[in-house]
Amino acid sequence: MKKALLALGGVVLTGGILGMSFLGGDTDPKDTTNTGEGEESVEAVKNEQAEKTTLPVPTSRTVDIGSNKPWEYMDAQAIIEQQNKGEVIYLFADAEAIENSISGFSTSEPVEGAPITKEDSAKSWANYLQGFIQGTEKYYPDKKDYFLKLSEIKVDLENGNFSEIPQKIEQAKLLRN
């Protein structure tokens, strides 16, 4: 009797395994031939590889600003508008100069009687920094931490938190190199 029950159990177990195989319940995760799930996995890998592929890095601007830096030549909003049209305004080579300019600005004393407050100027610098990030980040996917640090600095500029900016600029410089 025990042998009969064991044999019956073995047949049921074998039948269950074979049945699940045919129904797709026992698919190997590496085997992509049984279901459409493998196609999604292959597509995800292709997307990851495409994200890692870097764009050709621009080496020159498409808008002539002479020997000026973008923030010396154009309004921040105009820069962003031009970049949205596909123009190259900022180059990664501008990084050190914009970092130094923002650091110097953040430690400067407000000028009494100036037609614009330090907070208003800080908002302009935040916009210039946003333009720099927008114009260069896509070419340097390996510098994600650097651009995150710049984004923190941008928020500090927008909120008038000047005291931490020089230290964050130094951190950004280390991340850039």
Image (cartoon, rainbow, N blue to C red):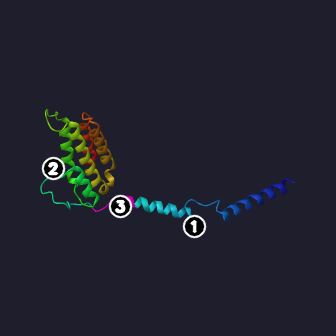
Q: Nearer the viewer, residue 141 or 83?
A: 83
Judge whether residue 58 is colored magenta.
no
Judging by the rendered image, the residue that carries numbered circle 2 is 72
Image quadrant containing the N terminus: bottom right
Judging by the rendered image, the residue that carries numbered circle 3 is 53
Residue lying at 24% horizontally and 35% vertically, measured from the top left: 162
Mark 2 vs mark 3: in front: 2
Q: Find the magenta span and give its range.
A: 50-56
Helix, strand or loop at mark 1: loop
Residue lying at 72% horizontally and 59% vertically, measured from the top left: 16
Asked if 127 appears above or below 167 in the picture, the reply is: below
Residue lying at 28% horizontally and 62% vertically, measured from the top left: 56
| Distance between the alpha carbons at the discs numbered 2 and 1 | 59 Å
Q: Specify which label sits upstream in the sequence, 1 or 3.
A: 1
Residue 81 got which mark? none
Judging by the rendered image, the residue that carries numbered circle 1 is 33
Three-letter residue code for mark 3: Thr
Q: Position of residue 43 (x, y in %)?
A: 47, 63
Q: Quadrant of residue 151?
A: top left
